[in-house]
Image (cartoon, rainbow, N blue to C red):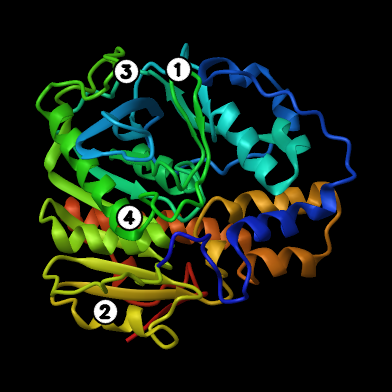
Amino acid sequence: MTTTPFISRKGMTRRSMLGAALAAGAAVPLAAAAGPAWADQAAAVPATKRLVLPGPTGPYPVGTVQLHLVDRSRPDDIAGPAHFRELMATVWYPAQNVERYPVAPWMPAGAFQAFLADAGFSELASLGPLTTGHVGAPVRRSERRLPVVVFSHGAHSHQGDHTVIVQELASHGYAAVTVAHQYDTYTEFPDGRLAVPSYDRQAPTLPGDFAADLRFLLDCVEQLAAGRNPDVDHRELPAGLLGSLDPRRMGAFGWSKGGTATACATLADGRIRAGLSLDGPMQMNPPLAGDLDRPFMMMSAEFTRATDPEAAAFWSHLRGWRLNIQAQGAAHISYGDNEALFPQVAKLLGWSGQQLQDVIGTLDPDQAVKIQQAYALAFFDEHLRHRRGHLLAGPSPAFPAVTYLP
């Protein structure tokens, strides 16, 4: 993979896909009035004006908190002398007593505005969806520590783009930790600084850099598990978070370049007990190498073993439990929040059915959401909690679009 924007098989960058998808709305007069901070954005626009993310299916309400992290083992030459790799991360977890805690937006306001401005459609900023995560809510008390799953986003994407899966895991008793890969995403720091994707070829934006971020995130999880706060600003954490995570039960997943990074990190770090790639191309220089004896699952769409030698080569080195499924009709962005959001945009802006399919594929959007929720949960349940169900054993009548690739 290079540091240029991710290119799909249809020759479009992720940015141009977003631009093409939103182009029909250029003449629609939409107000841009998002609030300045996580805690007060809920009041910026009436709820009926926002796009809506599907809620999680688990029994627990969800809490969330941001972490400002610095990896002092990795100097940041782009930021200048005496600077180190700086990251924003977000922890999602089962919560309690959430009523008085505001829900978090899909992206912080500044980052969301920059994300849309990059595609030329700032007027859509007022439609930013809200999550089900309550900012700063106490962690739900439990006799056992929480299994942990870390997440890596795709090229020029953002750490919230798989919130549907992240909050699904949290609602079922996981701590899910997402990270904003600096220089390849839209990041808003606590002091108000805003970072956008870089086209500098020296920027740390390769899958290997993402994998290093994931491994550092595991270090931070271990600090939280030991009762130490890794936040460099020493901000107060939600009650019950310290000491509540289980570093012996950690998994990872990622989409696109983040899926490749997940494979890379899982190969390199035995702390990752199970890895899940959502349509990762598995393209790296040097190539992914070595055998993996821990569970790994691939959910394919455009980057299949039949069409991509790198994906096939990685699969051939999986010596432990392995599974490769594909949802028929899925596009590259079908495994993510876009599958839920773009149909709403299409309805609002009067797209034709063909225009929508050109963006998200022909897989039914409701099914696409349920597939990513159900299969990610089933995979981590089986391999981090040893809760074996029937979903991963073979085709399910509940998900007829999902095929099991030999």
Of badges 3 and 4, nearer the viewer stands 4
Quarter of the figure with the C terminus: bottom left
Three-letter amino acid code of the residue under disc 4 = Phe
Residue 143 in view, yes or no = no
Q: Which residue is mark 2?
A: 315
Q: Which residue is mark 4?
A: 253
Identify the element where label 1 is drawn. loop
Of badges 4 and 1, nearer the viewer stands 1
Task: Report, in whole angstroms, how far the alpha carbon at label 4 lies from the one at label 2.
Answer: 16 Å
**On the picture, is 43 further left or further right than 124?**
left
Residue 370 in view, yes or no = yes
**Front residue (pair 228, 47):** 228
Q: Quadrant of residue 141?
A: top left
The vertical placement of 73 against 25, above or below, is: above
Q: Contact (CB < 8 A) between labels 4 and 2?
A: no
Residue located 34% across and 71% down the image: 282
Task: Report, in whole angstroms, how far the alpha carbon at label 3 lies from the one at label 4.
Answer: 25 Å
Of badges 1 and 2, nearer the viewer stands 1
Task: Report, in whole angstroms, how far the alpha carbon at label 1 lies from the one at label 3.
Answer: 25 Å
Q: Contact (CB < 8 A) between labels 3 and 4?
A: no
Mark 1 neighbour class, 10 Å CA radius: few under 14, some 14 to 19, many 20 or more: few
Q: Which mark is residue 191?
A: 1
The vertical placement of 355 against 181, above or below, is: below
Nearer the N terminus, badge 1 or badge 3?
3
**Front residue (pair 260, 321):** 260
Question: Residue furthest toward the front?
Answer: 81
Q: Which residue is mark 3?
A: 138
